Amino acid sequence: MEGILLPNCRNKDACPLDGKCLATETVYKAEVSGPETPKTYIGLTEPPFNTRYSNHLQSFRHEKYAHSTELSKHIWDLKRHDVPHDIRWSIAKRARAYNNETKRCDLCLTEKLYIMKADRQSRLNKRPELVSKCRHENKYYLSNFKEEFT
């Protein structure tokens, strides 16, 4: 994946990733800074990052999505206590999603590795995420294919 030129987004000034928000198959980090110890959230996305970023923004703006992720729970906790905060986004690593030939998802494995390596005191991710099943292989299930023969 190294050396691949990524397309730039339309508005680089508003881009959370310095013009690389259209990157696909990424493990990303959100570092939340404030008056207390900074917190880190590790996430992944198979489609372009800007799609996942939009979902995060929705969960920060609308309280009905406050429990969507551990990151949104933390942001809403800060908001409820009027704690000023800032979020810095970065791509930790790019990795391929599930491959039906190898039966492996490097994207999920990479995310789990980054979560395990993150400082326990500052990470927002919870332990159950480490044992969760890869959701990227679901698109290869036979039940997802429609019968075209009659």
Image: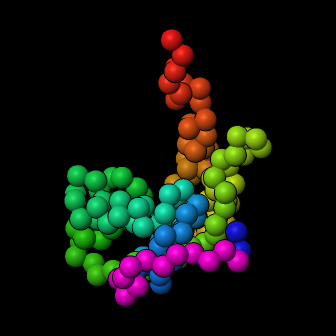
Q: Is residue 34 visible?
A: no
Q: Is residue 47 left or right of residue 77?
A: right
Q: Is residue 5 magenta?
A: yes
Of 124 and 145, nearer the camera is 145
Of 41 and 119, nearer the camera is 41
Q: Is residue 71 left or right of residue 40?
A: left
Residue lying farthest top? Answer: 150
Quarter residue 27 falls in: bottom right
When the figure is inspected, residue 73 is found, relative to residue 13, above or below; the finding is above
Q: Position of residue 99 (x, y in %)?
A: 70, 46
Q: Position of residue 26 (x, y in %)?
A: 58, 64
Q: Is residue 134 left or right of residue 19?
A: right
Q: Position of residue 122 (x, y in %)?
A: 52, 71
Q: Residue at x 29, y 56 (%)?
A: 66
For the record, the magenta segment spans: 3-14
Q: Residue at x 47, y 73 (%)?
A: 21
Tag count in the figure? 0
When the figure is inspected, residue 149 is found, relative to residue 42, above or below; the finding is above
Quarter residue 69 falls in: bottom left
Q: Residue at x 52, y 29 (%)?
A: 144
Of 86 and 77, nearer the camera is 86
When the figure is inspected, residue 87 is found, relative to residue 72, above or below; the finding is below
